[in-house]
Image (spheres, rainbow, N blue to C red):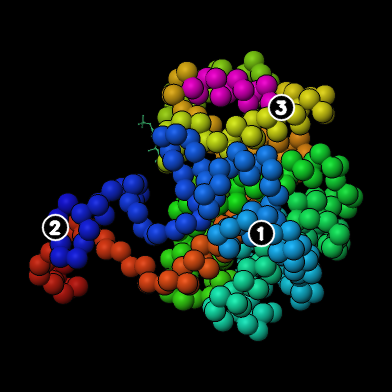
């Protein structure tokens, strides 16, 4: 690349692969080992022993909570579940066919109007904003699904944790302990993932000292793309399109021959199995077994086997989450908003970290255009 004064040599890497664009202690991905850590804790230990609420504390505070700190956070989150009535009224004006991830993005942008302290980016107020956002994402997603189906939103249940409360608000009945637990671990697994596209977006916006609502609204926009959080919905669409296990091989081979990407495979950082996929594969299997219908799990395994054989690619976090959510009876277009319900904890953690030691993020572009072209008046062109 051209060696411009003040332009780092590494900036020419397409897609910024391998470029360190922030310092963070929140999470780390080791793509060679297939390892993910949150604040030093291995994701496998957290998936086994922790809860989403505990992980939220960890991401925001760089350490695990004591039991009284955890109770205090749970109390604050539950006290913030409810969304302003004005927001529900606004959401009722949205088109019924609007994509729920776009509804979430717009609702979060509007939520700022009802927070008189939104512009205060001090640590103390930002933690309160982070609690509010994390508590209200599930309420907005569940309400948007009820509204589009012509139903009244189910008021949040302050006695339930975030995972159980979301499933309760979505369906209007308390989830089984098993489903609530599996969903809770899904939230743990999706909570943070270093400098992925939406988190980077949140940090860029926060770096201008714009408020947390602005940063998170932009992050939702980044998450919605099919190469990022939009992949999980597309995985289930693909499985439904394939339809039957005997169709898997010809379908995948044809798609690969046409150079189409199979959603839920490959990763910008992992060169081996995504550690989150290991848990989700098991959840998908269990969901099939307990429903007495392992079709989607079996089909997923077959797709996995063919993609490994043909392309040497591993499944990522989106692949088995699709069939897991499908077996829980969750509508396909809510999978990406569910990703956001979890990732809000990481986004807000990164925004808090960015505010603490802020520097405006302003990289350079490698100019590849022409120079010194004489200006020709329009009537002479
Ligand atoms: C995630 C992703 C964007 C990472 O991409 P990347 O590291 O930039 O890799 P590339 O897109 O450059 O792909 C490298 C090669 O692998 C192939 N590849 C990558 N992912 C693939 C997939 N899901 N299906 C088929 N082929 C794939 C590419 O076609 C390319 O092959 P080529 O060298 O023969 O052209 C990419 O794997 C992808 O698009 N996956 C599907 C979407 C998805 O699941 N996203 C969620 C990520 S958590």
Is label 3 in a helix, a strand or a loop? helix
Q: How crowded is mark 1: few (under 14 residues within 10 Å), some or many (20 or more)?
A: some
Residue placed furthest toward the bottom: 116
Q: Residue at the spot x=65%, y=48% of the render? A: 188
Q: Which of marks 3 and 1 is in front?
A: 1
Horizontal relation, residue 308 to residue 327: left or right: left
Residue 155 versus residue 42: which sits nearer the camera? Answer: 42
Task: Give me the C-alpha separation between circle 2 and circle 3.
Answer: 53 Å
Residue 35 versus residue 222: which sits nearer the camera? Answer: 35
Q: Mark 3 points at which residue?
A: 285
Q: Earlier in the sequence, mark 2 or mark 3?
A: 2
Q: Residue at the spot x=54%, y=79% of the render? A: 122
Q: Position of residue 302 (x, y in %)?
A: 60, 20
Do we see residue 235 in this rendering? Answer: no
Is label 1 in a helix, a strand or a loop? loop
Residue placed furthest toward the right: 173
Query: Would you place residue 273 above or below residue 53 in this image?
Result: above
Q: Are marks 3 and 1 in contact (CB under 8 Å)?
A: no
Q: Where is residue 63 in the image (x, y as percent from the top left)?
A: 58, 58
Q: Where is residue 366 in the image (x, y as percent from the top left)?
A: 22, 58
Query: Would you place residue 61 above or below residue 48 in this image?
Result: below
Q: Which corner quadrant of the figure contains ligand 1?
A: top left
Is label 2 in a helix, a strand or a loop? loop
Q: Name the residue under label 1.
A: 65
């Amino acid at each position: 690349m051209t060696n411009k004064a003040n332009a780092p040599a590494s900036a020419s890497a397409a897609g910024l692969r391998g470029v360190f664009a922030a310092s963070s202690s929140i999470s780390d991905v080791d793509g060679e080992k297939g390892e993910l850590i949150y604040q030093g804790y291995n994701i496998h230990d957290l998936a086994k022993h922790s809860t989403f609420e505990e992980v939220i504390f960890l991401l925001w505070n760089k350490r695990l909570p004591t039991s009284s700190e955890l109770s205090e956070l749970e109390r604050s989150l539950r006290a913030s579940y409810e969304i302003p009535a004005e927001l529900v009224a606004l959401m009722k004006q949205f088109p019924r066919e609007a994509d729920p991830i776009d509804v979430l993005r717009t609702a979060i942008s509007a939520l700022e109007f009802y927070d008189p302290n939104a512009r205060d980016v001090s640590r103390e107020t930002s933690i309160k904003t982070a609690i509010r956002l994390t508590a209200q994402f599930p309420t907005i997603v569940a309400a948007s699904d009820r509204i589009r189906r012509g139903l009244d939103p189910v008021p949040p249940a302050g006695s339930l944790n975030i995972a159980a409360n979301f499933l309760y608000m979505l369906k209007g009945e308390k989830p089984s302990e098993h489903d609530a637990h599996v969903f809770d671990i899904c939230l743990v697994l999706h909570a943070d993932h270093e400098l992925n596209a939406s988190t980077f977006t949140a940090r860029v916006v926060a770096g201008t000292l714009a408020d947390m609502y602005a940063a998170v609204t932009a992050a939702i926009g980044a998450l919605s793309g099919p190469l990022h959080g939009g992949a999980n919905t597309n995985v289930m669409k693909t499985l439904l399109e394939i339809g039957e296990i005997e169709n898997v091989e010809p379908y995948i081979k044809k798609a690969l021959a046409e150079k189409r990407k199979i959603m839920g495979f490959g990763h910008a950082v992992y060169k081996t199995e995504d550690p989150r996929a290991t848990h989700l594969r098991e959840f998908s299997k269990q969901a099939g077994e307990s429903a007495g219908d392992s079709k989607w799990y079996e089909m997923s395994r077959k797709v996995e086997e063919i993609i490994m054989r043909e392309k040497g690619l591993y499944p990522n976090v989106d692949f088995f989450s699709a069939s897991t959510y499908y077996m829980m009876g969750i509508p396909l277009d809510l999978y990406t908003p569910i990703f956001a319900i979890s990732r809000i904890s990481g986004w807000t953690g990164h925004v808090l970290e960015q505010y603490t030691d802020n520097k405006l993020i302003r990289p350079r572009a490698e100019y590849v255009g022409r120079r010194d072209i004489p200006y020709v008046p329009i009537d002479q062109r």
